[in-house]
Image (cartoon, grey):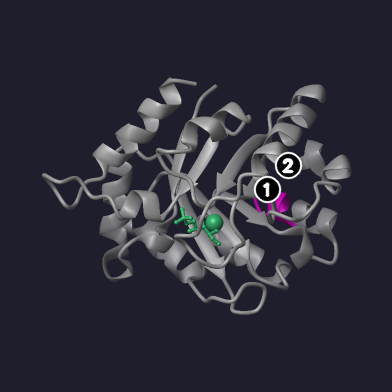
Amino acid sequence: MTYRIAPSILSANFAKLGEEVDNVLASGADIVHFDVMDNHYVPNLTIGPLVCEALRKHGVTAPIDVHLMVKPVDRIIPDFAKAGATYITFHPESSEHVDRTIGLIKECGCKAGLVFNPATPLDVLEYTLDKLDMVLLMSVNPGFGGQKFIPYVLDKARAVRQMINDRGLKVEIEIDGGVGPANIADVARAGVDTFVAGSAVFSKRNESDPNRYDTIIGQMRAELAKV
Ligand code: DX5
Ligand code: ZN
């Protein structure tokens, strides 16, 4: 299994975002997790396509994983595709027509993912899993960084891994919320391959160099190596 670490820039210093993204990637991160909140679907407000485009213009070439916590969702998808998103994931509750929204993301040339809140059942996967590149499981209720991991989501991860394996698919499983060195191995054992970590990464700068995050990312990789 190839494991990928996806720092959530929600916990980065927005006043110097380009540098923060460069630094976290240079410190060993694989993917940039980009949280989009609208103060409607979730009770917080963050960043939009202009910021995604600015990161690309700044020179970021790593995959950008756009996690849409907005409702409605379709209008903004082509804008994020033009702005350089690699993945676009959305919550099924935020679209009246989930199949159409998945199709729209693909038509725009991006990888598509569905996001499940902790209490949201997985039933829409029955008809959509084979069209998806990623399933994102929320291990906190969306809207804020720094919340506590909800353990029952591990059962959901095992269920999704089983569905993917049973169907012989190659869909990635990402987890988001409250992940850090203390629980990343358990999460991986449940079948997750991609790990979002916001506060765990950005609150732990290297002691020797405040612009680097190698120590914390290294700790997470060391835990993953035990799986
Ligand atoms: C929450 C966001 C997360 C958040 C994770 O709605 O989707 O990506 O930044 O933050 P931590 O890792 O601090 O729980
Ligand atoms: Zn997120």
Report the disc number at residue 191.
none
The quarter of the picture showing ligand 2: bottom right
**Can you say whether 71 is above or below 112 in the image?**
below
Report if residue 144 lies within the magenta region: no
Q: Is residue 194 above or below residue 95?
A: above
Which amino acid does the dot numbered 1 rest on?
Ala
> Label 1: how many residues lie within 10 Å, few (<14), some (14-19) or many (20+)?
many
Q: Quadrant of residue 41?
A: bottom right
Looking at the image, which residue sits at the far bottom? Answer: 39
Task: Give the residue displayed 78% in from the left and 64% down from the top.
Answer: 93
Q: Determine whether label 1 and label 2 are within 8 Å by CB.
A: yes
Q: Position of residue 168 (x, y in %)?
A: 77, 22
Residue at the (68%, 48%) spot, across then down: 113
Residue at left offset 58%, top offset 57%: 67
Q: Tell me where residue 128 appears, x and y as whole percent.
A: 83, 44
Say whether residue 111 is left or right of residue 96: left
| Residue 153 appears in the figure | yes
Q: Secondary structure at mark 1?
A: strand
Asked if the magenta segment contains residue 105, the reply would be yes
Label number found at residue 112 = 1
Q: Amino acid at mark 2?
A: Leu
Q: State which region is magenta.
A: 104-114
Query: What residue is drawn where x is 39% and y is 64%?
Result: 54
The reply to whether residue 83 is visible in this rendering is no
| Percent position of residue 83, x then y | 51, 61
Give the Cα distance between marks 1 and 2. 6 Å
x%, y% of residue 94? 75, 66
* 164 vs 215, nearest the viewer: 215
Q: Residues within 10 Å of mark 2 (few under 14, many from 20)?
A: many
Which residue has dot 2 on it? 132
Picture quarter containing residue 165? Answer: top right
